[in-house]
Amino acid sequence: MSKDVNKGLQYSVAVRALCEFTAKQGDLDLRFTPSPSAQEGIAGHAQVSARRSDSYQREVSLSGEFSTLRVRGRADGYDPVRNQLEEIKTFRGELNAMPDNHRQLHWAQAKVYGHLLCQKLGLNSLHVALVYFDIGSQKETVLQEEHSADALRHYFELLCGRFLQWAEQEIFHRRARDLALTQMAFPHPTFRPGQRQLAEAMYKASNRGCALLAQAPTGIGKTIGSLFPMLKASAVHQLDKIFFLAAKTSGRQLALDALSTIKRSAPGLPLRVLELVAKTTACEYPDKACHGDSCPLAKGFYDRLPAARSAALQVNILDKASLRELALAHQVCPYYLSSELARWSDVIVGDYNYYFDISALLYGLTMANDWRVGVLVDEAHNMVARARSMYSAELNHLSLKSLRKHAPAKLKKTLDKLHRQWAQLEKNQESDYQVYPKLPDKFMQVLQASCNHIGEYFADHPGAVDAELQRFYFDALLFAKLAESFADHSLFDISKDAHASVLCIRNIVPAPFLKPRFAASHSTALFSATLSPWNYYCDLLGMPDNTAWVDVDSPFEAQQLAVQVVKTISTRFQHREQSLAPIVDLMAQQYAAQAGNYLAFFSSFDYMEKVAALFVERHPQIPVWQQTRRMDEAGREQFLARFSSDSCGIGFVVLGGSFGEGIDLPGARLIGAFIATLGLPQINTINEQIRQRMQQIFGAGYDYTYLYPGIQKVVQAAGRVIRTETDRGVIYLIDDRFARPEVMQLLPSWWEVKS
C-alpha cells in the first residue's frame, strides 16, 4: 500500500490489500495444509488459462476510484463470450478443508475485480467465478455467482467506505510525518567525529537511489548516524518504509534506543516504530496450534484485529514487550499482530532474514505493495555467512530412517523408495566426503515425489500433528526448491559415516539470490567497522554496479592504541604446543606492567583451554575467567559482568564467538587484548572446495575463503578495546604472519603497528 504522491490526497491501494483489510473475519486458522509453491501456482494459473477459448483475456489490468481512494490490480482472467470474470486459486487436498476466512477473502477479491471490470467495459451484469485448481489432481472446481453491475458497485463502495477513514488517516499521518522529518534536527548538540561523514554518505546514497558500503569505526555512533539521515531522506525521497536489519538482538536494541533518542529530541514526531521477533519468541501458547479451536488468541482474531491495530498505532515504539502487552490486552496473537502492523509502520527493526531470506516477510510485502523502501544493514560483515545459510539446505539420512519407523502407512511406500535411492548414493560414494558437479536426477525425482505425497497426506489430514514428519517435509521442500536454481553459486556434497549420510546444497555465493533484494529497495546501506576489501562484499552479496563506498575517518588517534605484532610466536596448528609457554609469558609480562582487564582470543576452545590451564598453573595470583562451550545468555552476562571499572583479570575467549564483536566495554572495563590467531577458517575438505570455486569464479580463492574472513574477525575483536575518544589500550597480534604486507593492508589505517 502506498500513497500516490502525484495526485495530492489520493491514496493508492492494491485490490488484495483492500480486501485483506476489510473482508477478513473470524478466526486465525493456520492448520498445516500444504499450499502450492509459487512456481506451482504460476503453472496452475497457466494450465487453467490454457483450457480457455482463444477470446479469453488473461491478466486484465483494472483500476477505479472512490472518493480519495484509488484501487488497482490485475484480474486473473475474463471470458467475454460467457461474460465471466475468473479469480483463479491453486490448492492441494480437500477444498472443503479451506478455512472460511480464506474463501471470504477470495470472493471479496473476485467481486471487487468484477466491479472494476463492469466499470471499464460498461457492463450491466457479470458472472463472477472462483476457479479452484487442485495441483495434485489437475481438476477445477468452479464456484459461480451472477451479479448486477449495481450490486458489484455497492459491494465495492462498502469495502472502500470501510477502508476510506483508515486511508485518510494514513494520508494525514504520512504528511505530518514527512513534514516533521523535514524539520527534524540531529538529536545531539554535535556529531561525533566521523559520524557526520557517515550520515552524509547515507543521505547521498538515498539521493542517488544507489546502494552503499560504509566502513565506519566502532564508537562513532553508526546506528543513529545511519537512521537519522535515512529518516531525513524518507521525507525528501518519498520513502514508504525504513527497514533496520541487525544480526543479533543487541543490534536491534541499539536501533530501538536510537529511535527513542530521535523521538525524544523531536516532540510530536509521528513516527511508527515496530520490532519484529521470531515466532518462537513471540508465541504465548507454544503447545497449541494456530487456529481458533486450539489457541484462544487465534479465536476471533480478525474480529478483534481492527481495535488492536488502531490501539497499536497510538504507541510510540512497539518493541517486543509493548507489543505483547497490547496484543494480550486485545486477546490477539502478538506474532501475527506484528505481521499485520508491518504494513502500517514507518520504521521496522528486525533480523536480516525478514528482508533477505528465501521467504522474507518484508521483501514480500515490499513487492506486493510496491513500497519505496530504504534498507539499513547493521554489522554487515555478518551478511556473507548469514546469507549463505539462508540459501543452503541439508537432508540427514538418519532423520529419514527414524521417520520410516512410525510414518503413516500411506507414506511408507514413498519413504521406502526414497530410502533406497539414498542408500544407493551412499553405496556409490568412494570417500567420506565428496562434491558432485550436479544433483542426482533419479534421487531428486523421488524426493520431489515424496514431497508431493507428504503434502497430499497433510492436505487430507489437516488435523494431524507429527512434528518429525513436518520437519522432514520442510527440509525436503527447501532442498527441492534450492535444487531448482542449483548452479555454480552452490556446491552439492555428501558427507557420510558408518551410520548415515548428509546431503547438502551448500551456497557459497549468495549474490544471485540477493540481487533482487537490492533491486527492490530505493537504497540499501550496509555498514560495519570491517568491510574491507569492499570488492569481496560486492562480489559475494551481488551488490549493484553503482554501489558507493565510503571509508569513514576514525575518531581515534594512533597514540590511543599500542599495536604490537609478536613475530617470535607461531600459532599454526603444528606449532601450537610450542606456543603455549611463550604466550603465557607474554600475557603475564603485560599484566605485570599494567594490571587491568584484558581479553585473550584463541582459534579454538581446545587451544584456549590449554593456554588458560598453563597460565593458571604459573600465575595463580592473576584472576582468570573463561568462555565455556555452549555458554548460555546468563553465562555470557556473568562473564561480561567480571569486566568492571575497578576489576582486574584476563578473560579467555574464542575468536569469532560471542565476545569477538557486539560487546561494549569502555574505559577501564577493558584495556587490552591478546589475539593468538589470524582467525583463518580451518583448512578442511569443505573449505578447500569453497576455495577452488572462489578461484574459479573470482580468481581469489585463498583470499576469499581464508584471509579476508579471518582478518575480519581479528579486527572486530581488536575493536573491543578502544570504544571512546578517551580510551587507551594495547593489542598484541600474536603470530609472525601478521607482519606480512597482504595482512597489514587489511588492518585499520589509523593503527601504527609495531613489529
Image (spheres, rainbow, N blue to C red):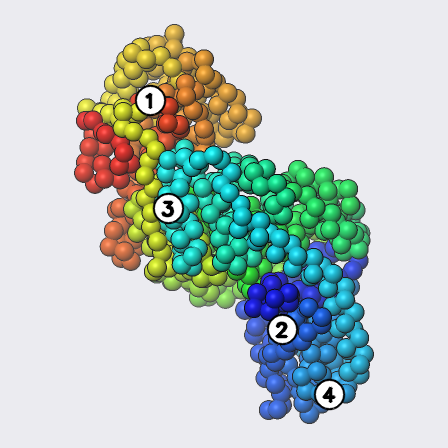
Sequence-wise, which precedes: disc 2 or disc 4? 2
Q: Nearer the viewer, residue 116 or 395?
A: 116
Residue 473 lies left or right of residue 304; in this view the side is: left
Image quadrant occupied by the C terminus: top left
Q: Disc 1 marks which residue? A: 729
Q: Disc 2 marks which residue? A: 73
Could you say whether the residue bearing mark 4 is in a helix, strand or loop?
Answer: loop
- Mark 2 Cα shell of 10 Å, populated few (<14), some (14-19), many (≥20): many
- Mark 1 Cα shell of 10 Å, populated few (<14), some (14-19), many (≥20): some
Residue at the location (73% across, 63% down)? 163
Give the amino acid at mark 4. Answer: Leu
Image quadrant occupied by the N terminus: bottom right
Mark 2–mark 4 CB contact (< 8 Å):
no
Q: Is residue 651 above or below residue 158?
A: above
Sequence-wise, which precedes: disc 2 or disc 3? 2
Could you say whether the residue bearing mark 1 is in a helix, strand or loop?
Answer: strand
Sequence-wise, which precedes: disc 2 or disc 1? 2
Mark 2–mark 3 CB contact (< 8 Å):
no
Residue at the location (76% across, 54% down)? 306
Res 123 label: 4
Cα gap from disc 2 to disc 4, whole angstroms = 19 Å
Residue at the location (34% across, 33% down)? 555
